[in-house]
Each structure stands twice: as structure tokens, then as C-alpha cells.
Amino acid sequence: MSSRSSSPSILSDNDSDLSSSLSEDVPEIIEGEFIPYDENLEPVATQEEAAAFEENSVREEEERVMFQRRFAGEVETNTWCKCSQCSTEAVTKAEEYVCCKEIDRVGEVMSQVDLEDQCITLHPGFRDVCLNRWVLEIASLALKTKAGKSYRTLFSQGLKSESE
């Protein structure tokens, strides 16, 4: 039984016109009938959007390969580290093989304190914000791993990463 036929109409004339024009494109649903997903209703990317997506995908793949080569030791640290402070001792994943100078926002932040050519670790706020145990512990309350686990849970289990 359709709820439309049993309830009084509260649509104005304009609403009714809009409703009927919209329903012309939508097949009538018969109670109990399954209507499959219609791919034709999906929006189609413009040529510009498709080109931008493809360009971004190529760039991301190039970065992934570059990080993987660094992780595998195929590329020496001194060839990609521009700040002279990069260390790979505690690095556990390929995507962590990045120099602070490769991150656009770091340059902006460092220029605010007139240290454009220096490593982010030399920023006056770095130690307090990034290395302070209590700040990190509080921040971990709001953060989740890619698998949706709480960093706090991992820490309480004595784990440093999900892969352990």
C-alpha cells in the first residue's frame, strides 16, 4: 500500500508541478519490485576534471615509486634530503621517506620565523608541539589509524604501529 494514496496532499501547485516533472524521469516504483542501480544517473566528469584526475594519479604513482625506492635503499638519503637533518633510523613505511623541504606548507611556516632554509625541527615551536609527550598523548585521543584503531589503544597494547 502506498503512503502517497492514503495521506492528504500538502503540496502547493508549484510543488505539484515540480513533483510531476521530476517523476517523469523516474520510473514508477511498484511495491515489492526491485529496481537495480542505474549507472546512467551518475554524474560524468568533464574533460578538464578527467585530465586533472589522470595527472594527479600519475603524480601520486610517481611519488609512491620514489618513496618505495628510498625505502628499499636504492636512493641515498643525501640525494633527497635537502635540510640535512633527515634520518631513516625510525622510519617504518615508504611514505615516511620525505624531507620537510618537499612539503610546501613547511616552507610557508618556516618563512614566518625567518628560517626558510632550515629544517622544520629547528622551528621554535617544533619541540613543544611535535615532541612533547603530553601534547602527543592528547592529540592521539582524536586520531585514528587507517584501520580505524585508536593510537591510544595501540600505545596501551605496547605497539608502535598497526603492523606489530
Image: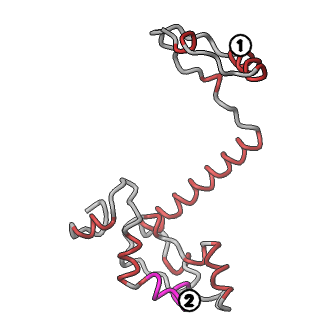
Quadrant where the image shows the C terminus: bottom left
Name the residue tied to disc 1.
24
Q: Residue at x 63, y 81 (%)?
A: 109
Q: Position of residue 29 (x, y in %)?
A: 55, 11
Give the residues in magenta.
120-130
At x 52% / y 58%, what residue is drawn?
Answer: 64
Horizontal relation, residue 16 to residue 95: left or right: right
Determine the residue positioned at 50% across, 64% down: 67
Earlier in the chain: of badge 1 and badge 2, it is 1
Please say whether residue 127 is one of the residues in the magenta stretch.
Answer: yes
Compared to 107, does 27 lie above or below? Answer: above
Q: Is residue 99 above or below residue 12?
A: below
State the residue in front, 105 or 50. Answer: 105
Residue bearing mark 2: 123
Residue at image position (70%, 41%) is: 50
Q: Amino acid at mark 2?
A: His
Residue 99 spot, x, y in % from top left: 54, 76
Nearest-to-viewer mark from 1 and 2 = 1
Magenta segment, prevailing SS (helix, strand or loop):
helix
Horizontal side of residue 148 vs 110, given as left or right: left
